[in-house]
Image: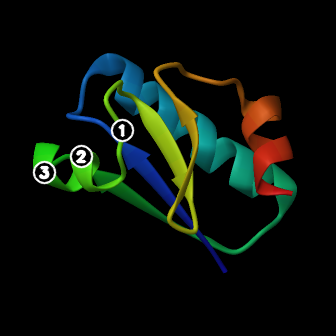
Amino acid sequence: MKKIQVLGTGCPKCRKLAENAEAAAKAAGIEYSLEKVTSINDIMKFGVMLTPALAVDGVVKVCGKVPGVDEIRAILS
């Protein structure tokens, strides 16, 4: 099971990233859990300075932008 984490304070871009990540995981047919990390302190523990960010299994893959569903699907594969 993949652990997908969306790092951000809940802004519209953060919500869009969460939607795209969920759609990508469903399209890829993988088992996943989606967690929204909204605490600034928790986000900083990842070393992220720009949000939104996407982490997969605890590793930051995208930072400071909202990738499309296809791009996230490629990351998850």
Q: Amino acid at mark 3?
A: Asn
In the rendered image, the vertical position of residue 44 relative to residue 30, given as above or below: above
Q: Quadrant of residue 2?
A: bottom right
Of residues 19 and 50, the one drawn nearer to the viewer in this rendering: 50
State which tag comes first along the sequence, 3 or 1: 3
Q: Which residue is mark 3?
A: 41
* Left or right of residue 39, residue 8 in this image: right
Image spot of residue 17 (x, y percent): 50, 32
Amino acid tagged 1: Val
- Amino acid at circle 2: Met
Within 10 Å of disc 1 (Cα), the crowding (few <14, some 14-19, many 20+) is some
Q: What residue sits 50% from the left and 65% below the top? A: 58
Say the numbered circle drawn on residue 48.
1
Identify the colour scheme used. Answer: rainbow
Tag shown at residue 44: 2
Q: Nearer the viewer, residue 77 or 27?
A: 77
Q: Residue shown at 60%/35% (left/top)?
A: 20
